[in-house]
Amino acid sequence: MSVALLWVVSPTSEASYGTGFLDSVRDGSRILDSFRSIARCKNVIYSGRLSNGHKNRRNFSSMSADLRYACLGGSTFENGNRLSLTSSLVATPAGEMTLSSEQRVYDVVLKQAALVKRKLKRNEGLEVKPDIVLPGSLGLLSEAYDRCGEVCAEYAKTFYLGTLLMTPERRRAIWAIYVWCRRTDELVDGPNASHITPTALDRWEARLDDIFKGRPFDMLDAALADTVAQFPVDIQPFRDMIEGMRMDLWKSRYKTFDELYLYCYYVAGTVGLMSVPIMGIAPESQAPTESVYNAALALGLANQLTNILRDVGEDARRGRVYLPQDELAQAGLSDEDIFAGKVTDKWRIFMKKQIKRARKFFDDAENGVTELNSASRWPVWASLLLYRQILDEIEANDYNNFTRRAYVSKPKKIIALPIAYAKSLVPPLSKASSSLVKT
């Protein structure tokens, strides 16, 4: 199941890369400790064309979930507002109480927000370091960032245009994260996915650890290593994304929405948590840091749920059903109905409820986009508006997502871009009028 890269507003293709990259993951080649190794590995970069028929896995403007994710008994933000508690605890068949997926994800959100706040307090603002010159490889790091930008420009054209409004440092950092997410996604959803094993993903995670320790394997890793050294980006969302890839290797059914929620966080919501420190929060924003991260999470979840609803037929042909099994049963439907691919009244009723849920996450996401740094808002708004229109197209197709693929036409995209730009000019609400968090 592929994921929606938030800033990829036309997710209809997949990237492939040189076999050297996959070989290095499969055979467990040791990650090089010297930056000079980058020069030898500089050809291990994206090559080849995107092949149609697969979904992009991530959402790069991911802007977040329902402010429902609360600690047990509710949680208090820095401004004194409280989060309401919906379902922090879930009973197991044995009668034991466990944390829900929402609570587990919210704990990660709190950690990311705390990291940013510590960084800002320590530095009195986000200071970006100048280019790092690698020993014996003058200018190679700049070349690595340029290559990341080329990948983004080729496979995420609309988002790439939006990134050009950012400061050079933020723009390059977003490109580096985008490329890492795409490479990770391609491990299990690309042309060589049949060769990927859990062991290969373990090696990819070990390689991630080395990136965060400043020991990149190739030039694209070097761009990300430089990015995480400059910005308050935590490794946990990256690890969680890899966990989502592991899940795709063995899991093709989800009993409840709680299970599906966790999967959507792993493969898409994580991108929002990675991106917020790069995109930055507007200096004049009065919103709690946690609420901005929650908005980032919501957009990732909304985009991934939209992908799932758009691609029901495609996934079914691969033997996968990314829909809550209990909700299907409540609607009088089963996997057999999905494999049959017939639009019935039961299916229409079921789809209306699923679309309503996805739209709720988009609504929650809107609350946080305005709080971002002014130069970062346009690509996020463009992603949000265009992805949400996919839900409209599913409805226009009479909920036939078995044999018809919902997509946003080029004229509609062109119309959406100036609307997104206008929305990006709206400043954050004042403290008196801001109400991101419901009391």
Image: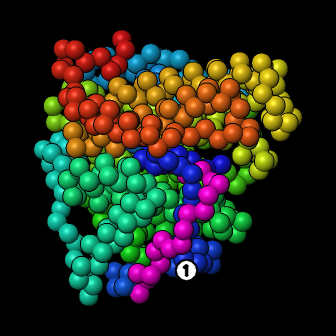
The answer to whether residue 406 is seen in the rendering is yes
Which residues are drawn in magenta? 40-59
Disc tally is 1
The answer to whether residue 277 is seen in the rendering is no
The residue indicated by pointer 1 is: 20
Residue found farthest to the top: 439
Q: Quadrant of residue 118?
A: top left
Dominant SS of magenta comes to: loop
Task: Identify the residue shown where x is 20% and y is 69%.
Answer: 131
* Residue 386 in picture, x, y percent from top left: 45, 37
* Residue 126 in picture, x, y percent from top left: 18, 49
Q: Nearer the viewer, residue 306 or 65?
A: 306
- The image shows residue 276, relative to residue 368, as above or below, that is below
Task: Identify the residue shown where x is 50% and y is 73%.
Answer: 47
Q: Amino acid at mark 1?
A: Gly
- The image shows residue 3, relative to residue 338, as above or below, that is below
Q: Quadrant of residue 427?
A: top left
Q: Nearer the viewer, residue 436 or 307?
A: 307
Residue 68 relative to residue 185: left or right? left
Instruction: Classify mark 1: helix, strand or loop.
Output: helix
- Image quarter of the C terminus: top left
